[in-house]
């Protein structure tokens, strides 16, 4: 059972989820991508 469902783990969704969880709410956050941060996600590659 959750108090909030947040769709999207970009900046806004991640910050909102953290704020709600810090205030004691149970939060479920989902995203279609396998990482958080939305378009700001970065990673190291061979180049």
Image (cartoon, rainbow, N blue to C red):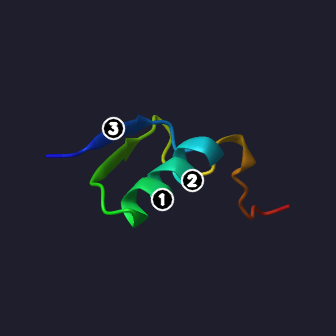
Identify the mark at residue 40; answer none if there is no mark: none
Mark 3 Cα shell of 10 Å, populated few (<14), some (14-19), many (≥20): few
43 versus 38 height, above or below: below
Q: Residue at x 39, y 45 (%)?
A: 29
Going by the picture, which residue comes out furthest to the left? 1
CA gap, disc 3 and disc 2: 13 Å
Report, in whole angstroms, how far the alpha carbon at label 3 lies from the one at label 1.
12 Å
Question: Relative to 39, is 10 on the left or the right?
Answer: left
45 vs 1: above or below: below
> Element at badge 2?
helix
Helix, strand or loop under label 1:
helix
Residue with the mark numbered 1: 18
Position in image of residue 36 (x %, y %):
55, 52
Q: Nearer the viewer, residue 27 or 39?
A: 27
Mark 3 touches mark 1? (CB < 8 Å):
no
Q: Secondary structure at mark 3?
A: strand
Crowd class of label 2 (few under 14; some 14 to 19; many from 20; radius 10 Å):
few
* Residue annotated with mark 3: 5
Q: Earlier in the sequence, mark 3 or mark 1?
A: 3
Q: Which residue is mark 2?
A: 15
Residue drawn where x is 25% and y is 44% of the image? 3
In the rendered view, tell whether residue 12 sits above or below residue 18: above
Nearest to the observer: residue 9 or residue 23: 23
């Amino acid at each position: 059972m959750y108090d909030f469902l947040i769709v999207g783990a970009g900046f806004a969704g991640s910050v909102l989820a953290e704020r709600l969880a810090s205030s004691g709410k149970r939060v479920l956050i989902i995203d279609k991508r396998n990482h958080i941060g939305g378009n700001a996600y970065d990673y190291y590659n061979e180049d």
